[in-house]
Amino acid sequence: MVLELGRIPVKEIAWGRKTLLEGAVLRVHREELIEKTKGDDPRITSVKAHIARPGESVRILPVKDVIEPRVKVEGKGGIFPGLISGVETVGSGRTHALQGCAVVTAGQVVGVQEGLIDMSGPGARYSAFSKTLNVVLAINVKHSISRHEHEEALRLAGLRAAVYLGEAGRSVKPIDVDRFEVYPLFKPKEDSNDLPGIAYVYMLLSQGLLHDTYLYGQNAASLLPTLIMGTEAMDGAIVSGNCVSACDKNTTYHHQNNPVIRELFKRDGIDLRFLGTVISNCNVTLRDKMGSAQYGVKLVELLGADGAVITKEGFGNPDADAMMYCAGLEEKGIRTVMITDEFAGIDGASQSLADTTPQADAVVSTGNANERISLPPMDKVIGDIRIIERMAGGQSGSLSREGITVELQAILGAANELGFELLSARGE
């Protein structure tokens, strides 16, 4: 099966009388966007739409999710199956992506582990979303609803907005088209049989308490480890429902543009065989952690893998799940590489992971999320600056006339464990 992903670059966003692409300019009918965002959800009381451009003196917080606008132009299914479209399996056909822009959902805080995006200043270098043209939706909901209803309302609203904007690229010719082919397991790419087979273990945070991820609309917490095509993630099959620490949160945008999947496809048939992607959840109880890890290791072994790449989301509790995978795979003779961030204290001297195993001898760090940074005031704040003192990475006294002082964990994507950003660390 083949997925063609057409790239349509967006160089500017402006409000207009109609939503359409004029060259590299995305013009957006603001009132229509707001109506599409609200949908018929009675839980949403108001939506305000803003544009935030790279280099502007703008701070966005609290950020719930980031989504890349896309449209399915050929093949079965639609964008965000199980939530916005039907439940048909995606990952083949043709999809157009409006690259260089994003939908950002913000507004009332859902959980204390949401984060911020600075469009300029020292904080901008730590988040890829300071470099995208952002349509920011500040969404308010009824105070009487639960936090889980609040999360769901914002999650679906952001997806509706991204689908609405993505339609602008339906009839536009992409600047180029990337082609991703999934080969049957026993019919690999020609002349690649002698290459090592690599599987990807893609851990999705799914611990409840607003730490949730959705696969085809189903909460991953209830799923056994599952084999999917990497192209399904590109086609919107995985959606973030997380209010986990912002630095290593996988937004929906991260899932759509997973760099590990892209790199494995890029190298398939050159120096490795990309065998498949095993989706796994991160559980709460020791019994469930052991059960998922053992089942997931079995799937990787059945694929005939020589090696595996493991990524996770979040820190602390998920460290144990990842280490169980690493130990289980290594015991089967399957060499593993793990990508993780660190929480090593503000001085970098503390134990950086909550769990370890001797088999984890090939670990790529995406940086220390406890490192502190001072961020100057911005001319415009979309959201509520006062909540910085209640957010993970902030503390009482973080806000002052000179700006804010926070740990990197407050910045969205700063230590993303898919390797999306530039931070790293090494032992001496």
Image: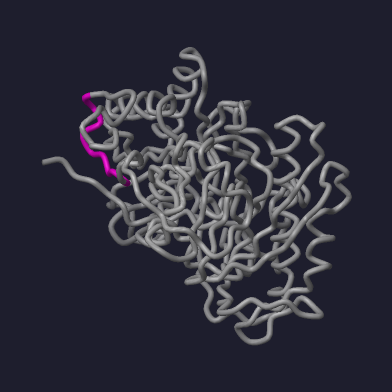
Residue 4 can be seen in this image: yes
Q: What segment is highlighted magenta in the picture?
A: 358-366
Taking depth in this image into account, of 331 and 407 the one nearest to the observer is 407
Residue, far left = 428
Residue 113, x across and y down, in percent: 53, 37
Taking depth in this image into account, of 290 and 305 the one nearest to the observer is 290
Residue 189, x across and y down, in percent: 41, 59
Asked whether, in this view, residue 96 is left or right of residue 398, the answer is right
Residue 364 painted magenta? yes
Residue, far bottom = 23
Residue at image point 48% right, 38% down = 245
**Number of marks drawn:** 0
Residue at image point 79% right, 35% down = 143
Taking depth in this image into account, of 309 and 10 the one nearest to the observer is 10
Please tell me whether residue 50 is drawn above or below residue 259 in the rendered image.
below
For the N terminus, the image quarter is: bottom right
Asked whether, in this view, residue 210 is left or right of residue 312, the answer is right
Taking depth in this image into account, of 338 and 334 the one nearest to the observer is 338
